[in-house]
Image (cartoon, rainbow, N blue to C red):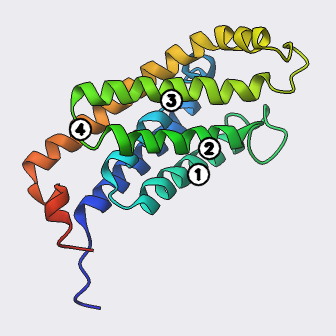
């Protein structure tokens, strides 16, 4: 047991994700829910986990667990009056979109730099826009089940997606910027150095 060494990179990435997930859950409790709607950290959390967890199992499971825990806190508090069940309607599409966002982080952010983070952010927002709004449109009595009806849903969602873009860019700037700074200051957080520990 005394020979077990903990990977400081993995622990640091996990702390970043958990703290940001906690902010996601707590900020709506003290702010205007309508203003904060979709100004979310989930896109940044997904990209961050995809970029910095070397293991696929950790890259997908730990950010998804953080999303679930923050969703659970929100559904039992701020959004309690809006939810008829354990989680919100269409949650499975949000989680599918979230998993795709992690994949974007793994593919685009193999090399973390400003341009790649911005590119990954726009791809993430596009995924969120299409996947989640498909759930709003499909089977809806409010919108015709045609491409025109789906287009209407997409157009109506633009203000929310702009806020999601703002949130993803803002949280990504903080998370990626701070972690890259820490990597320079503490070389043990670099991937090659972290492979020496478990």
Q: Report, in whole angstroms, how far the alpha carbon at label 3 lies from the one at label 1.
A: 15 Å
Label 1, on which residue?
69
State the mark number for residue 187: none
Rounded to the nearest whole Å, what is the CA distance between mark 4 and mark 3?
21 Å
Q: Which residue is mark 4?
A: 112
Could you say whether the residue bearing mark 2 is in a helix, strand or loop?
helix
Q: Secondary structure at mark 4?
A: loop
Residue identified by numbered label 2: 95
* Marks 4 & 3, CB-CB < 8 Å contact: no
Find out whether the residues at labels 1 and 4 contact each other: C-beta distance under 8 Å.
no
| Viewer-closest of 2 and 93 | 93
Q: Residue furthest front?
A: 147
84 vs 178, left or right, is: right
Q: Quadrant of the N terminus?
A: bottom left
Q: Earlier in the sequence, mark 1 or mark 4?
A: 1
Q: CA distance from mark 1 to mark 4?
A: 27 Å
């Amino acid at each position: 047991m005394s020979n077990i060494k903990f990977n400081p990179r993995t622990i640091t990435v996990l702390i970043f994700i958990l703290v940001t997930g906690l902010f996601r859950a707590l900020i709506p409790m003290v702010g205007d829910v309508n203003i904060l709607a979709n100004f979310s950290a989930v896109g940044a959390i997904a990209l961050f986990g995809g970029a910095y967890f070397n293991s696929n199992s950790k890259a997908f499971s730990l950010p998804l667990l953080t999303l679930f825990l923050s969703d659970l806190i929100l559904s039992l508090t701020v959004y309690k009056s809006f939810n008829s069940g354990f989680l919100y309607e269409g949650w499975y599409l949000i989680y599918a979109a979230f998993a795709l966002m992690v994949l974007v982080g793994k593919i685009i952010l193999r090399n973390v730099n400003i341009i790649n983070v911005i590119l990954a952010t726009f791809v993430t927002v596009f995924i969120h826009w299409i996947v989640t709004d498909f759930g709003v449109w499909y089977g809806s009595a409010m919108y015709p089940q045609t491409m025109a009806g789906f287009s209407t849903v997409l157009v109506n969602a633009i203000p929310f997606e702009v806020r999601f873009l703002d949130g993803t860019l803002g949280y990504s700037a903080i998370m990626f910027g701070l972690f890259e700074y820490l990597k320079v200051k503490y070389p043990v957080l670099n991937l090659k150095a972290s492979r020496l520990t478990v």
